[in-house]
Each structure stands twice: as structure tokens, then as C-alpha cells.
């Protein structure tokens, strides 16, 4: 089922030029997304989640970033040599994005309608003869927005945060994308609204077959929504598994630390935090990047980068402890 | 909206009244009068002239008379230009100043926004540096020097354009450029910084993520947000340009209103001073009201007070 694969990126490395020199934000990372799949990406702030997904749309600042990969395919197209114009073709139609803060993601001087129509005009999913208003109304209705007719002529500041995020999602799916990237879309919203938005995402994946990459640092949200999860630490995925496997059988010490810092759930005992600070990407620890904070760190952890171990059902993690278990 | 405009007009009338009163008092506080000259007039002659123009009345009566005639739209006779009323002078000179000013305003706004936008498209590129250099020059070099240089280089050395008078399109180019230079440079700077700020905003990233081209992003997403400070600046600028610049009108010998205004002060031509002041102030107040009404059209977040309630 090759054509089920929407994103197939192998060995992705992203380097950003900064005043302090080149910064390797993503290190040898694979990304794989299938149709109808919701892939969760978790990790602390600054671990490279956003950079990674932005690279899937070519949204990283040109000139300041170097992207290297063995394979970089989106919807079967090789994007390694893409320039701005090629990305523009892709954006909004194949890959769309929903941003974190709906309060600032909409243009304050354009009406909701105008901002949705733009995407409809660009898309070729509707043929030559279409009614932009009807399409937009239908979208807003699907997003569960009340009185959609009124919303079309309103400006963003007249809507609440939850309504705006629904508009943002409507806007993102208006181009009938195959891939939807959501960069912490519910972080700025209250819990009730969050639940509604998450349900919406699930519907999109199931009914429209959209593959969703969902970034969050909220494990509770990930557990509710996603099929598979990638746990990222210092620019690299340390563990990836199905939601069930990850929450029932976490293997990487960082994942375990994250789960133990949840106030409820299976791993809840005494609430514990992960000691230490996220690493300085300019000066990564030798060996495993997590070793200075790891409770079970061994001598080898500070010397050599661990290999990936697969324990079946595509449950992969990158830790020397796997060796102890004979994997 | 209508109530808002009415309220604004009401407060504008109060402002105008205050301006008239202050000007009236200041004017009479300056030593000398319209008929004081180096050659002393015989006292009887002076007295009879002053009687003719009611300058011998007590000040409060002159004041109330003046206010009375302004209400009827009569700005009185000029003391220096015999047989001409202030209304005549404004009617004759203002169209010229307004023509010059409107052209300069268009050049400044269109040129300034275009230059600023080009600058902001590639910040810190060669073109940006060139535009920044020229606009800094434009802001800091005084108008009379720009005018003099243009007259000398384009008019004299190259002999391309006429350097004086106001007789047709070719006569307009140099004075319009001179008058537009400074505001154009300023608008270019405002637009550039506005755009650079807007390009950092999340909604521009959203627009990019939608796959919109850079021109669409500039025109339909960025520019409207970026020129809000420019709009604020255009109000007083328009008033300043329309009422004529004394300097530009003098350099290019243009018979506009600006010249009359300045010379009337030397001449103690009371009615012209007051008349032109009233006219200017009205223009400025009206233009400010217009700008305030344009604001909500461009930025929907700004509403007039009534709508907000």
C-alpha cells in the first residue's frame, strides 16, 4: 500500500544559522505519516517539534536553514530540490497548517469569509464552477460554528478564541489538503473548546482521510487523539510507538519521565518532575543527549549514541538500556 | 456614525472659535498696525482711514463684529490690497496652492508607500539600503535646499523644465517634487518599518502556509495593516500641503496662498491674517475628521464611539 503513505522522510537533519553559529535542531530524524493517521509529536519547548513540521511545508526561512535528507517525499513527490514556488504549489492544497494561537493567526483587517475564500480559490479540488460562499458555509457548519452566515462577514476580533480556531481549521481544510499539520492548536484554548476541536480532528482523519501531524506537549491530549506518537528530545525522536504501546509500555527513560510527571493515569504515583534542564543545542552532551538527566544512565550513555531498537509493532526507541534487555 | 460626525463638528466649531480668539488677541498685541509705516501719515488722515475700517472702535467691539461677519461667511476687506476682500484673495490663491498640494500629496503617498514596500520586500538588500539612504537624505535636507538644487540642476544646467510660475503641467513638476520630497521620504520610512513589523506577525505565516504568492501577501494581507500609521500622518500632511508652502511658493514664484499668509503678517493685514488662519484651521479640522472616518474602513477593529457602545 505505497500510495497510503503521505509523508516519508528519512534521515532528516536541519541546521539553522544563528549568531552563535550553526545550530543542529533536527538530527537524523525519520518521519512517516499514513492516510487517516493521526501522528502525535510530544517534547519540551525547543526540542525541534515546530521546526520539523515547518520543514514539511518549506516554511523555514530560506538561506538561514540547511535541510538535508536521504529521502523527502510528500504525497509521493520528492521535495528535496523544492524552491519557494514549488512549496507554494504544495501549501494549502496538499499540506495545510493550523497554528497555535488563533488570536494572532488570522488577519485582523480581512473578514473570515475573505480569508477562507482565498484558499478555495487556490484549490483545484472544486473544479472551475463553484460557489465559494456555499463551500465556506458548509465548512464552517462542519466545524460546528454557530450562525455561519454571520461569521463570513465578521472580522476576527468579533469572534472568540475557540471560534477563531475553528475558522483556522476550516481555512486549513478548505483546500482539501491530504496532510494537516497542527502546531499545538489547542494550547491557547480552554478545556471544553479543546475537547470539541479534538473531536473535529478525529472526524477529519476518519471521514476525509486526512493524515494529521499533531504537535502538543500535553500527553493527555495525545492519548485521546493520536494513533501513533513520536517523543522528541533535543532534535531527535527517542521513542515512537502506537498510543497504546507508548502509554502502557514506555521504554525510553525520557518517556517514562514524561508519563510520571502526569497528575493522573497509570503512571501516577507521587508526582515527579524530570530533573535538570533541557540541553543546550549548541553544546549537546556526548553520547545520548538525555544521559545527564537520566536516572538509569550508564557509563556507555555518556560515550556513544545509542542505536534504535525495535521491539515489535513498530515500537522503536533509542536507548542503551535496550541492550541490557538483549534487544 | 452620523451622531459621531455631528459631535465632531460641534467640537470643531469650539476649536475654531478658540483659534480665532487667540489669533485676534495675539495679532493686536504685536506693536504697529496695518497703517503704520515708516513715512508718518498726518494724524487726521490716519484717523480717518482707521475710522473707515472701524479700527478706532474698542477692541471688544472689533472682536464681536468680526465674529459676526465670519458667521455670515464674510472674512472682511484686505487693508493692504485695496478693493479686494479676503474672500477674493483666498478664492484666487487657494486653488493654485491646492493644486500644488494635492499633486504633492499624491506623489508623496504613492511614491512613499511604493518605495517603502520595495524596501521591505528585501530588507537589508542593496535596494533597501539605497532607498533608506535617499529617504534619510529626503527627511534631513531642508525643502529650500532641495528646491534650489532642483532649480539649479534640472532647470538651469539641464534646461529641462521651467523653474518659475504656474502655467501648466511642465511648470508643476519641480515644485511638486520639492514639496513632496520630505513627506515622501517620511512615508517611505513609515511604510518600511510598518511592513517589516507586519511580516513578523503570525497571520502572515498563516498566509504563507495557505500557499499565497508574495504579491498577494503584500497587497491583501500586509499593506493594509502596515499603512495604518501612514493614514494618521496623511491628515495633518494633507492640510499642510494643501494650504501651500510659503517656501516652495517663493522659490518657484507661484501665486499661492502661502505667500499671502506670510506677507500679511509683515503688513499687519489683520483681516488677511485672521481670514487665512480661519481657513487653514477649518481645513485641518475637516481633514482630521475625514482621516478618523477612513480609519474604521481600513482597520475594522477601530470603530466610531457609537458603534462600540
Image (cartoon, grey):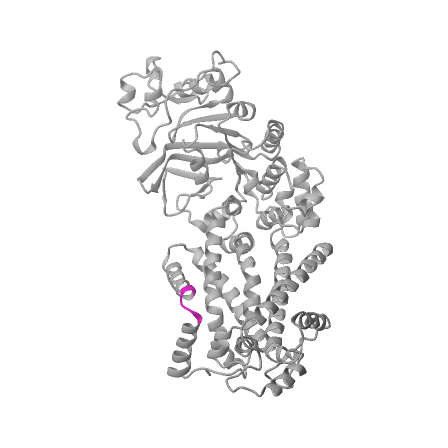
Quadrant of residue B47 in the image?
bottom right
Q: Main secondary structure of the magenta part?
A: helix
- Pinpoint residue A213: horizontal percent, then vertical percent: 50, 33
Observer-nearest residue: A323 or A164? Answer: A164
Residue furthest to the top in view is A269
Quadrant of residue A143 in the image?
top right
Q: Give the quarter of the figure containing the C terminus of chain B.
A: top right
- Pinpoint residue B217: horizontal percent, then vertical percent: 52, 52
- Pinpoint residue B167: horizontal percent, then vertical percent: 54, 84
Q: Give the quarter of the figure containing the N terminus of chain B.
A: bottom right
Residue B141: in magenta span: yes
Observer-nearest residue: B45 or A271? Answer: B45
- Pinpoint residue B63: horizontal percent, then vertical percent: 67, 70
Residue A107: in magenta span: no
Residue occupying image coordinates x 49% and y 25%: A228
Tell me: residue A59, above or below residue A320.
below
Tell me: residue B265, above or below residue A211.
below
- Is residue B238 rendered to the left or right of residue A286? right
| Magenta-colored span | B139-143
Tell me: residue B269, above or below residue A210.
below
Residue occupying image coordinates x 70% and y 56%: B7
Observer-nearest residue: B106 or B70? Answer: B70
Amino acid at each position: 500500500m505505497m500510495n497510503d503513505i503521505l509523508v516519508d522522510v528519512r534521515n532528516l537533519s536541519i541546521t539553522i544559522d544563528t549568531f552563535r553559529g550553526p545550530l543542529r535542531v533536527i538530527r537524523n530524524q525519520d518521519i512517516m505519516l499514513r492516510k487517516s493517521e493521526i501522528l502525535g509529536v510530544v517534547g519540551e519547548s525547543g526540542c525541534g517539534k515546530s521546526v520539523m513540521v515547518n520543514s514539511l511545508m518549506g516554511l523555514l526561512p530560506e538561506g538561514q536553514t540547511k535541510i538535508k535528507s536521504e529521502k523527502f517525499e510528500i504525497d509521493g513527490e520528492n521535495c528535496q530540490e523544492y524552491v519557494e514556488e514549488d512549496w507554494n504549489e504544495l501549501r494549502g492544497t496538499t499540506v495545510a497548517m493550523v497554528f497555535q494561537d488563533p488570536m494572532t493567526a488570522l488577519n485582523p483587517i480581512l473578514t473570515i469569509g475573505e480569508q477562507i475564500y482565498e484558499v478555495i480559490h487556490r484549490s483545484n479540488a472544486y473544479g472551475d464552477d463553484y460557489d465559494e460562499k456555499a463551500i465556506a458555509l458548509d465548512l464552517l457548519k462542519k466545524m460546528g460554528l454557530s450562525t455561519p452566515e454571520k461569521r463570513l462577514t465578521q472580522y476576527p476580533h468579533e469572534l472568540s478564541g475557540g471560534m477563531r480556531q475553528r475558522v483556522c481549521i476550516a481555512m486549513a481544510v478548505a483546500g482539501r489538503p491530504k496532510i494537516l499539520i497542527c502546531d499545538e492548536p489547542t494550547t491557547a484554548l480552554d478545556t471544553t473548546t479543546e475537547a470539541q476541536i479534538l473531536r473535529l480532528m478525529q472526524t477529519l482523519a476518519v471521514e476525509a482521510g486526512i493524515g494529521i501531524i499533531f504537535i502538543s506537549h500535553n500527553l493527555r491530549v495525545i492519548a485521546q487523539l493520536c494513533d501513533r506518537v513520536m517523543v522528541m528530545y533535543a532534535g531527535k525522536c527517542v521513542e515512537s510507538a502506537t498510543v497504546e504501546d507508548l502509554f502502557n509500555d514506555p521504554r525510553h527513560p525520557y518517556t517514562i519521565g514524561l508519563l510520571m510527571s502526569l497528575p493522573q493515569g497509570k503512571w501516577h504515583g507521587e508526582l515527579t518532575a524530570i530533573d535538570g534542564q533541557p540541553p543546550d543545542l549548541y553544546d549537546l552532551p556526548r553520547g545520548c543527549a538525555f544521559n545527564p538527566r537520566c536516572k538509569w544512565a550508564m557509563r556507555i550513555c555518556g560515550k556513544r549514541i545509542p542505536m534504535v531498537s525495535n521491539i515489535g509493532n513498530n515500537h522503536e526507541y533509542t536507548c542503551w538500556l535496550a541492550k541490557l534487555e538483549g534487544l | 456614525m452620523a451622531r459621531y460626525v455631528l459631535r465632531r463638528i460641534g467640537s470643531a466649531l469650539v476649536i475654531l472659535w478658540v483659534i480665532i480668539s487667540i489669533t485676534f488677541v495675539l495679532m493686536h498685541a504685536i506693536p504697529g498696525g496695518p497703517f503704520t509705516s515708516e513715512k508718518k501719515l498726518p494724524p487726521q488722515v490716519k484717523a480717518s482711514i482707521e475710522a473707515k475700517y472701524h479700527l478706532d472702535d474698542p477692541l471688544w467691539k472689533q472682536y464681536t463684529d468680526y465674529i459676526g461677519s465670519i458667521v455670515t461667511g464674510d472674512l472682511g476687506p484686505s487693508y493692504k490690497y485695496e478693493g479686494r476682500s479676503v474672500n477674493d484673495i483666498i478664492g484666487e490663491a487657494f486653488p493654485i496652492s491646492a493644486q500644488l498640494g494635492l499633486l504633492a500629496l499624491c506623489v508623496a503617498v504613492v511614491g512613499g508607500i511604493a518605495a517603502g514596500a520595495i524596501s521591505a520586500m528585501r530588507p537589508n538588500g542593496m535596494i533597501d539600503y539605497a532607498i533608506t539612504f535617499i529617504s534619510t537624505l529626503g527627511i534631513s535636507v531642508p525643502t529650500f535646499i532641495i528646491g534650489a538644487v532642483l532649480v539649479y540642476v534640472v532647470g538651469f544646467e539641464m534646461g529641462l523644465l521651467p523653474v518659475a510660475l504656474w502655467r501648466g503641467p511642465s511648470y508643476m513638476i519641480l515644485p511638486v517634487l520639492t514639496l513632496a520630497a520630505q513627506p515622501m521620504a517620511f512615508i517611505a520610512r513609515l511604510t518600511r518599518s510598518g511592513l517589516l513589523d507586519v511580516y513578523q506577525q503570525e497571520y502572515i505565516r498563516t498566509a504563507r502556509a495557505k500557499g499565497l504568492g508574495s504579491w498577494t501577501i503584500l497587497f491583501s494581507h500586509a499593506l493594509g495593516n502596515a499603512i495604518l500609521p501612514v493614514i494618521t500622518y496623511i491628515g495633518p500632511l494633507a492640510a499642510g500641503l494643501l494650504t501651500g508652502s510659503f517656501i516652495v511658493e517663493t522659490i518657484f514664484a507661484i501665486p499661492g496662498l502661502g505667500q499671502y499668509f506670510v506677507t500679511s503678517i509683515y503688513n499687519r493685514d489683520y483681516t488677511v491674517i485672521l481670514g487665512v488662519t480661519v481657513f487653514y484651521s477649518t481645513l485641518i479640522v475637516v481633514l482630521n475628521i475625514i482621516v478618523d472616518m477612513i480609519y474604521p474602513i481600513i482597520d475594522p477593529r477601530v470603530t466610531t464611539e457609537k458603534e462600540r457602545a
